[in-house]
Amino acid sequence: MRKLLNTLYVSTQGSYLSKEGECIIVSVEREEKLRVPIHTLSGIVCFGNIMASPFLMGFCAEKDVGVSFLSENGSFLARVKGPVSGNVLLRRQQYRMADSESSSVDIARFVLIGKISNARTVLQRFLRDYEKNDYNSVKDVVSRLESSIDRLKRTNVLDELRGIEGDSAKLYFSVFDNLITVQKEDFVFKERNKRPPLDNTNALLSFLYTILAHDVSSALETVGLDPAVGFLHRDRPGRDSLALDIMEELRPFIADRLVLSLINLRRVSGKGFRKTESGAVMMDDATRKEVLIAYQERKRDEIVHPFLNEKISVGLIPFVQALLLSRYIRGDIDGYPPFLWR
């Protein structure tokens, strides 16, 4: 099994990344703040006004360490990576299957069964933890999500799958506010909004979704798949559609649960967010760092993977799912097994 490496997140504005020997140097106002050996890293993510030397970017490309540049609130800007790796025959088969309606439906159905099942489990865990309270609306959504999974199994039309997914997402987020049990004044959740996020909870969700997408893209490239060519999400210039596909099933378990923990355990507070003139909500540096620390801690947690029946780090789930998808595309297994949280 692949070893879980660290991701270096740089959020201090004005930081400069450079190379010295086999190490990456992070400096602020020409003062060295951090020195990291590159062999310990799987990627670097820069937020906002962060600069990097051409030699550093070339070094990272040579060592297969992706460097991503995001805005301060986590919107993707650009990514630097080395030459395309992997088996060209695997990618050609991926492209053929993406062009096939039936193949796309098969993979999209598995992905969405994973997503809706995991969203349902998030709600079930909440009901178990707060069984003394009356949450009939949450119980109703749990039941309706089960019906959505049954509908997924009966349709062979891609647009119908997307419609079921859209309806299920609205149902899930319609009761998400119930899952926030403290700091209700600062973290009110009415609906999912993005580009830009308009409240504190949506700002957290969007930020973590972006980070998760980065990890999934890296995992797909590692196993030789093209992150840009998806099955549920169709091709769009500048978008990693396959990464968005695989991320769907991982959002509830990795990102949504972490957002709820950050709020309910008071690791973040309303004071760490500000609203811009455009209405967008952004985190301050301290809050962003706390979220990144919590995300790294979450990635180090261990679970038993439901398909492999092996103990792995949460941070390796994107890699395992990418590996399983590549095996399905090659024809080594009969179907793509989505990640199902139990």
Image: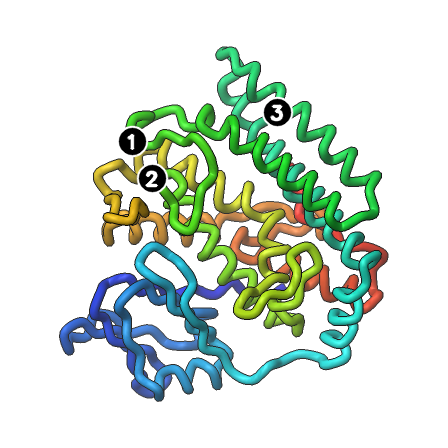
Query: What secondary structure is marked by label 2?
Result: helix
Q: Which mark is residue 200?
A: 2
Residue 327 sits above or below residue 288 on the image? below
Say which residue appears at 43% left-offset and 71% top-offset. Answer: 78
Q: Give the percent coordinates (x, y) of residue 135.
A: 53, 16
Q: Give the percent coordinates (x, y) of residue 285.
A: 24, 53
Disc 3 residue type? Val
Residue 150 sits above or below residue 39 on the image? above
The answer to whether mark 3 and mark 2 are in CB contact below 8 A is no
Q: How many other residues sit within 10 Å of disc 3, few (<14), some (14-19) or many (≥20)?
A: many
What colouring style does the render use?
Answer: rainbow
Disc 2 residue type? Asn
Q: Give the percent coordinates (x, y) of residue 68.
A: 42, 69
Q: In this orientation, does residue 40 appear?
A: no
The answer to whether mark 1 and mark 2 are in CB contact below 8 A is yes
Q: How many other residues sit within 10 Å of disc 1, few (<14), some (14-19) or many (≥20)?
A: some
The residue that disc 3 covers is 141
Q: Earlier in the sequence, mark 1 or mark 2?
A: 1
Q: How many other residues sit within 10 Å of disc 2, few (<14), some (14-19) or many (≥20)?
A: many
Could you give the CA–CA distance between mark 3 and mark 2, rounded to whole angstroms? 24 Å
Could you give the CA–CA distance between mark 3 and mark 1, rounded to whole angstroms? 25 Å
The residue that disc 1 covers is 186
Disc 1 residue type? Asp
Residue 189 found in image quarter: top left
Q: Earlier in the sequence, mark 3 or mark 2?
A: 3
